[in-house]
Image (spheres, rainbow, N blue to C red):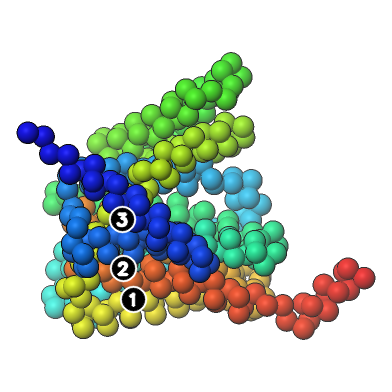
């Protein structure tokens, strides 16, 4: 007799993630925080009603691919070109400093012996901290009327480049989960992937442009686009040893500057993602997070990781902004805007767990850091984005 419990699991997850997501939005927090909390409550940490199954693992993987495909589609290439070199420098230093900081925290707590696996795990914790989720920052800046300014543009541009760099680093790290892997082999695989990506990207971009002229905005276009994202994800993982989410992200990036199709595809894919697969992914992270086993050592580890997560982005991105000629006050603002980790860090951590690059016992600390940085970022921005007397005077002068 077939087991239909998976239907009950889906219903519980969808209802709980939506309920807690709405509660989060009522207190001006992203709904992802509520979805995480829903997974923790349903999982072994609290009620124990839902456990990890093969179905949930595969469904949540589709959720990751859809999220990263949407992230690629949402990338504004014109915005990226506008900020140019400044955003690149801010992003690079904003990746290097958290990478070093996160690795150092891991070594401080868990490096009894400095063998290859320990170094790999430490570096991966650093990789998790390199991620930036700018969605909460964008919403906060929009509410404050600061999104279109120099600081807002720099934050958005740096966040886009930050994500690309983070995905490349993740792909490089994932290749080491194979015992037979070598740095040279990993580097060649990634290089081959990007050559493949360039060729495929040119062809697919041309094909979709022609389809836009012939077919227009039809449902089949969204189906073709999602199929392309799944195929590129499969190719990345199977043929090049690169994370499947990397393929999904670049699938979106290839299609992001076909103006009309971009919006239509995004709208259609977002419905499928929002209705089922994304809630399953975020809930699955919470379900895998067993807070009941959180010892004092891991609590201290989480607190240290949180401190480094905040300071490393403020210092790293702020330093990059200073090099690019921003004022000290604007450097602080840019750093604060890059603090939130959100769903990007969760996706990276989830991928690391699957590849054996991070222990299941360390995931609760990552989840706590994600939730805390998401909560802290709007507060930090509300403090640092207040206009100074000089800025107020300059603004009044311009409007006079």
Q: Quadrant of residue 152?
A: bottom right
Query: Which label sits in the foreground, 3 or 2?
Result: 3
Label 3–label 1 contact, CB within 8 A: no
Number of the front mark, 1 or 2: 2
Is residue 357 among what the camera can see?
Answer: no
Q: Is residue 42 left or right of residue 400?
A: left
Whether residue 45 is visible, yes or no, is: yes
- Tell me whether circle 1 and circle 2 mark residues in contact (CB < 8 Å): yes
Residue at image position (92%, 70%) is 400
41 sits left or right of 398 in the view: left
Q: Position of residue 268 (x, y in %)?
A: 49, 35
Q: Which label's residue is closer to the chain start, 3 or 1?
A: 3
In the picture as drawn, the residue positioned furthest to the left comes out as 1
User: How far is mark 1 from mark 2, CA to CA?
Assistant: 8 Å
What percent of the width, then of the height, locates residue 13? Answer: 30, 52
As helix, strand or loop, the secondary structure at mark 3 comes to helix
Query: Which mark, by number, is residue 283?
Result: 3
Quadrant location, the N terminus: top left
> Residue at the location (54% across, 76% down)?
379
Res. 305 mark: 1
Q: Quadrant of residue 297?
A: bottom left
Name the secondary structure under disc 1: helix
Numbered circle sitting on residue 366: 2
Determine the residue positioned at 33% across, 71% down.
368
Nearer to the camera, 355 or 240: 355
């Amino acid at each position: 007799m077939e087991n239909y419990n998976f239907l009950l699991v889906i219903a519980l997850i969808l209802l709980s993630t939506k309920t807690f997501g709405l509660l989060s939005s009522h207190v001006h927090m992203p709904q992802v925080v509520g979805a995480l909390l829903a997974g923790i409550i349903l999982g072994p940490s609290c009620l124990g009603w839902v456990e990890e199954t093969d179905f949930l693992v595969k469904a949540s993987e589709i959720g990751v691919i859809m999220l990263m495909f949407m992230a690629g589609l949402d990338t504004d290439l014109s915005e990226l070109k506008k900020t140019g070199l400044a955003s690149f420098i801010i992003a690079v230093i904003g990746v290097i400093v958290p990478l070093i900081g996160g690795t150092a925290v891991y070594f401080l707590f868990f490096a009894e012996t400095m063998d290859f696996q320990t170094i790999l795990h430490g570096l991966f914790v650093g990789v998790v901290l390199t991620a930036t989720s700018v969605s909460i920052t964008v919403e906060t800046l929009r509410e404050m009327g600061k999104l279109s300014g120099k600081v807002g543009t720099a934050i958005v541009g740096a966040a886009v480049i930050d994500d690309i760099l983070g995905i490349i680093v993740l792909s490089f790290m994932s290749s080491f989960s194979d015992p037979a892997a070598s740095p040279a082999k990993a580097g060649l695989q990634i290089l081959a992937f990007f050559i493949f990506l360039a060729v495929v990207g040119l062809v697919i971009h041309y094909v979709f442009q022609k389809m836009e002229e012939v077919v227009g905005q039809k449902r089949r276009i969204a189906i073709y686009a999602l199929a392309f994202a799944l195929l590129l994800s499969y190719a990345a993982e199977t043929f090049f040893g690169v994370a499947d989410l990397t393929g999904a992200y670049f699938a979106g990036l290839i299609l992001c500057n076909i103006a009309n199709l971009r919006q239509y595809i995004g709208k259609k894919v977002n419905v499928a993602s929002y209705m089922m697969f994304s809630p399953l992914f975020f809930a699955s992270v919470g379900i895998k997070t067993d807070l009941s086993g959180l010892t004092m050592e891991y609590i201290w580890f989480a607190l240290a990781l949180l401190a480094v997560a905040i300071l490393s982005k403020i210092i790293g991105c702020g330093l990059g902004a200073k090099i690019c000629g921003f004022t000290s006050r604007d450097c602080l603002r840019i750093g604060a805007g890059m603090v939130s980790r959100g769903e990007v860090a969760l996706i990276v951590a989830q991928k690391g767990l699957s590849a054996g690059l991070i222990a299941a016992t360390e995931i609760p600390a990552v989840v706590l850091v994600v939730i805390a940085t998401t909560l802290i970022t709007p507060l930090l921005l509300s403090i640092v984005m207040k206009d100074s007397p000089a800025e107020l005077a300059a603004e009044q002068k311009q409007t006079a």
